[in-house]
Amino acid sequence: MSTSSFAIEVPASLLDRARRGEARAFEQIYRLFERPVYSLAWRMLNDADEAQEILHDAMLTLFGKLDQFRGDAPFWGWLRQIAVNEALMRLRKRKLIEFTDEVPEPAPAADEQSGFDSRDLEAALRRLPTVTRSVVWLYHVEGYSHDEIAALFDKSVSFSKSQLSRGTQRLRGLLTVAEGGLAYAG
Amino acid sequence: MPDEIDRISVLTGEPDDRRLAEALRALPLLSPARSALPAVLALSGKRTARTHRHLPGWMAWAAGLVVIGLGLFLFNGQAIDAERTTAADVGASADLQALMQRSLEWETALRRLEQQSMPMDAGTAMASAELEDLISLTDLQLGATENDEQAQSLWERRIRLMSRLAEVRTQPAWDKAFPDQSPTLLSATYPIN
């Protein structure tokens, strides 16, 4: 079972209606996936404006290519791939790897289950280089394999593994281990 | 399979790593500042070559001036007849498309204006934030519309709100350019309910 926030089953009838060009069906699909697409883009690029543009472009691509969806894999996976590709296109346009101490845009609530404030994790995540953060996110949250990540970035499997290792280490360095939980040390 | 082993070792080898992965997955979903739906719907029907939305500085300024001009035009009551248009006047789908297109044009103008990020005073910032909230509310209502008549009314409302948002956002530029005349442009003409 996928841990991805994209993993939403979309009824075939809704997809059929959207394929026929029914605007209300488009709207429903958009509402279902707006936040997963935006969140993925934001996590990868760490930029609200770019995430907004990726949301726009991914949805436009989705609706433009809906006829090409054959239904032999989950719809959400197909849409997620479109969103990841849009994000990667922007990563390639950037000169990659940067650190940032920008003020966090979202204000997440404390995560009682994990025993620490998710704000700390957000802050630590933002300090990772863009590519490293993207690999960490795609692997841990979206469940991509190293092979898949290597293909997405047009790099080797070693690249994916080393980025993941580096990212995890850096995150752990930024989050000091405290009794009963992790706390931000940045 | 080796990949699965890697994943398992990451998740089970170090309790802190496992907790880290779980915590990453538990981070809350984020919401965009505004819906992309209106622009996507407007464009998806007649998709053409995409335009690049990043402008050089001088073009952004030019776009800003255009928005100021539009704001003045609206303020004088010579444009955007959305308020005067009733649902009964028009056949639904063609006019809905036109409204969506107009909404998109305002959205584009506002986005270009945002790129200039002119500093604004607290009152203007608050008015701007409230208008943005109303636009978001309208987007939510658009997602739940039952028929074209309702949708048309909401799209008209969206356009009105965006035009007023443009007026509010151009206020600082106007103040700077014409310090003696600025009060004539805007006087918080939008109703917030």
Image (cartoon, grey):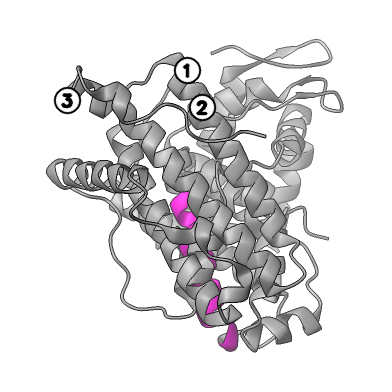
> Where B110 falls versus A62 (above or below)?
above
* Left or right of B161, for residue A28: right
Mark 2: amino acid: Ala
Instruction: Say if the magenta span includes residue A19.
Output: no
On residue B123, the disc is 1
On residue B165, the disc is none
- Give the magenta part as a residue range: A51-67
Instruction: Pinpoint the chain carrying mark 1.
Output: B
| C-alpha gap between disc 2 and disc 1 | 6 Å
Which residue does the numbered mark 2 point to in the structure image? B127
Q: Residue at x 51, y 27 (%)?
A: B127
* Left or right of A120, for residue B170: left
Mark 3: amino acid: Ala
Q: Position of residue B16 (x, y in %)?
A: 74, 27
* Local secondary structure at mark 1: helix
Q: Residue at x 16, y 45 (%)?
A: B62
* Local secondary structure at mark 3: helix
Which residue does the numbered mark 3 point to in the structure image? B177
| C-alpha gap between disc 3 and disc 1 | 19 Å
